[in-house]
Image (cartoon, rainbow, N blue to C red):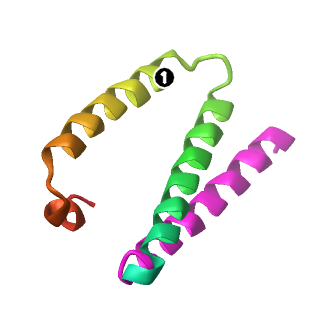
Amino acid sequence: MHTNEGLVTAAYVVAAVLFILALGGLSNQEKAKRAIWYGISGMTLAVAATVSAAGGQTGLISLMVILGGIGGWFVANRVQMTQMPELV
């Protein structure tokens, strides 16, 4: 196992823990802001690890991130705040 592979695996484990913390925190209004940041951090770490593991072939990953971001932006702008928990 190369050092890069070990770092990518560790990043995935940390990202998974952050996702679990995010889901657990969303059940409580006082912890929701922190939980959202856990989720954002976990997703950023997971995407960075995936791009790192892909080496120089990041074109398709970049395209999917852009398309997903555009789709998420449209959905988020059409959902009212009272429907937000259902969206998550």
User: What residue is rendered at 47% in x and 68% in y?
Assistant: 33
Amino acid type of disc 1? Ser
Foreground residue, 69 or 63?
69
What is the secondary structure assignment of the residue under circle 1? helix
Question: Total marks drawn?
Answer: 1
The residue under the point 28% across, 39% down is: 72
Query: Where is mark 1, residue-wise?
Result: 62
Front-most of residues 61 and 88:
88
Q: Position of residue 45 (x, y in %)?
A: 62, 48
Span of residues in magenta: 1-28
x then y, percent, for residue 14: 65, 62
In this view, 84 is above or below 55: below
Q: Is residue 64 above or below residue 50?
A: above
Q: Name the foreground residue: 29 vs 22.
A: 29
User: Based on the displayed image, in which of its 4 quarters is residue 52 positioned?
Assistant: top right
Q: Residue furthest right?
A: 3
- The image quadrant of residue 84 is bottom left
* Residue pictured at 25% horizontal, 33% vertical: 71
Horizontal side of 19 relative to 27 (left or right) equals right
